[in-house]
Image (spheres, coloured by chain):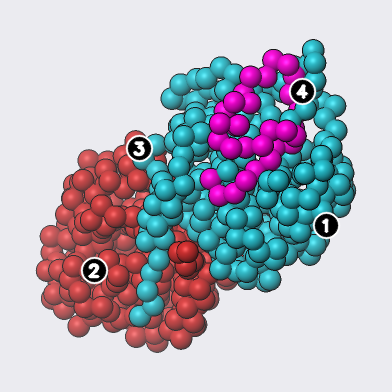
Chain colours: A red, B cyan
Amino acid sequence: MPRLVAVGSIAYDSLETPFGRRERALGGSAVHFSLAARLFTEVGVVGVVGDDFDGEPVLTERGIDTSGIQVVPGGTTFAWEGRYGYDLNVAETLDTRLGVFEHFDPQLGAAHRDAPVLFLGNIQPDLQRSVRAQSNAAFVALDSMNLWIEIAKDSLTAAIGEVDAVILNDGEARQLTGEATLLKAARAISALGPRIVVIKRGEYGAALFVDGRFFGVPGYPLEEVFDPTGAGDSFAGGFVGYLAASGQTSPDLEHLRRAVAYGSIVASFNVEEFGTERVQRLCRDEVDGRVRDFHAMTSFVLA
Amino acid sequence: MPRLVAVGSIAYDSLETPFGRRERALGGSAVHFSLAARLFTEVGVVGVVGDDFDGEPVLTERGIDTSGIQVVPGGTTFAWEGRYGYDLNVAETLDTRLGVFEHFDPQLGAAHRDAPVLFLGNIQPDLQRSVRAQSNAAFVALDSMNLWIEIAKDSLTAAIGEVDAVILNDGEARQLTGEATLLKAARAISALGPRIVVIKRGEYGAALFVDGRFFGVPGYPLEEVFDPTGAGDSFAGGFVGYLAASGQTSPDLEHLRRAVAYGSIVASFNVEEFGTERVQRLCRDEVDGRVRDFHAMTSFVLA
């Protein structure tokens, strides 16, 4: 039985950045998340694909349980086409074909219902609530996106009220709460229910708010950033995966801080190559090594 | 004799933010810098004003040596009028009246030539070079702005080659070097001569590159940001002021890291109120307290 079950999109991404392009690269929030989280713990993926999907071996070869991937005969897998300019923080969507993802109605099998940790990747918030209701997990984390803040804010607010941890980027946190500063936005999100609020800031790092306390890291400095697609999901996979491995159902501050560092570092590997390419061949030793470097790069001593 | 001499603009700023406005608030790079640096060491200001200037008591009452401020009879002090929208990262200049600042030709008096530390605030880079040539300082830091990168890049490059530390914001560092990542931009600046490169990232914190090593801090999380004017100069004042107080002519990594933390924290106070208002009544104890909080907020323990 996996310790961590992740629900989200499984997709083919066609990507263009100033540095090159890829056609139909394996992607989607659940894929990026699980490829990151499997570095820390046993992961099961719940998602939907068409019978054009051939990416399963990439997951199973890395120990990821794919029994929760539903294959719709005659259907086509969610496909996204996007482009980044030199400002890699902003993606321009060229084409979105939802395919079988449009009618995704995630159901947890018996083995997945009892996994102690659940990650609700970026899907329609009513579906996130449905999955949460099916699960007996002791710790549940949720990611979302601006689309749901715009068209399903009440549902998203309800979903947030039912989880332990929320992971958003800073623009989303501000948009959701109407608060200008990160501190106020995080406090407003926490007031909806979650003990833990994580705010991703792209190249600028990440921040954690828990029990009224703040923790922040800058971004890991990279020589090159190749493709930011999936960075947020890789962050979430490192963060939640690290916590799932700890076995704590109410993680303490020390573990949470370290989990933010692990999430940041897995994301830093993710953006060094296209799509999932770098994280596919990432080893735990490499992650641990870069986390040690990161620790040295962010520590100072009081006088 | 001051340990630290700062050359730069002395100005009256008329400011408008979404939170209010101020007419003719005391400002300018040398003023913001010295009000910050005086928390750490003895500071002398070198600048020029017209006989409309009445801000000197604000400086002298805080122990700042104003003997280097030249008063031009019949002249008017540099005046800037600007506005910030809800994105407090971007200032819109409504009016600039250079006044006596247009013909500023800074001359160091005997006591100022021998100060061990010199800060070259944001003025025309040939003037920075002239001041640097007049000084016997063992440690010299320089700030600049996008204007000089655009219209006096060769002079600025030469000025950078003559100092120990450069302090720029991230947009300026990228613009100056044409490099997309912070790491490459910092390395390119260091290749011009300076051992120390500091990159300010506004609300996202600051980064330090020294001897090929990186150090980074996130921004100190604030409940409210009222007015960002002078944040960069306050950062520089905290950073250089802390180093000047250490007495090291080639500061070691431990002091440099702590100086980045001090710069960040002084800047965090600066933006809490209009112009120099908060830093004028800031005490060293408050700064030390917030630096301790900041240390706790940015530390994690390796497993």
Residue at mark 2 shares a chain with residue at mark 1: no
Q: Tell me which amino acid carries mark 4.
A: Val
Mark 2–mark 3 Cα distance, whole angstroms, equals 27 Å
Which one is in front, B182 or A75?
B182
Residue under label 3:
A179
Badge 1 crowding class, 10 Å Cα cut-off, few under 14, some 14 to 19, many 20 or more, is some
Residue type for callout 1: Gly
| Residue B52 lies in the magenta stretch | yes
| Image vertical order of residue B6 relative to residue B9, above or below | below
Residue A299 in the image: state x and y as whole percent. 48, 68
Left or right: where A302 falls relative to B215: left
Tell me the residue at 63%/26% (across/down).
Answer: B56
The answer to whether the residues at label 2 and label 1 have Cβ atoms under 8 Å apart is no
Q: Do pointers 3 and 1 mark residues of a single chain?
A: no
| Distance between mark 4 and mark 3 Cα atoms | 45 Å
- Residue pictured at 46% horizontal, 21% vertical: B20
In the depicted structure, whether residue B180 falls above or below residue A289: above
Do the numbered discs 4 and 3 sit on residues whose CB atoms are within 8 Å? Answer: no
Give the labeled residue for mark 4.
B71
Q: Which residue is mark 1?
A: B161
Q: Which residue is mark 2?
A: A252
Label 4, secondary structure: give it. strand
State the separation of the CA atoms marked 2 and 1. 48 Å
Q: CA distance from mark 2 to mark 4?
A: 60 Å
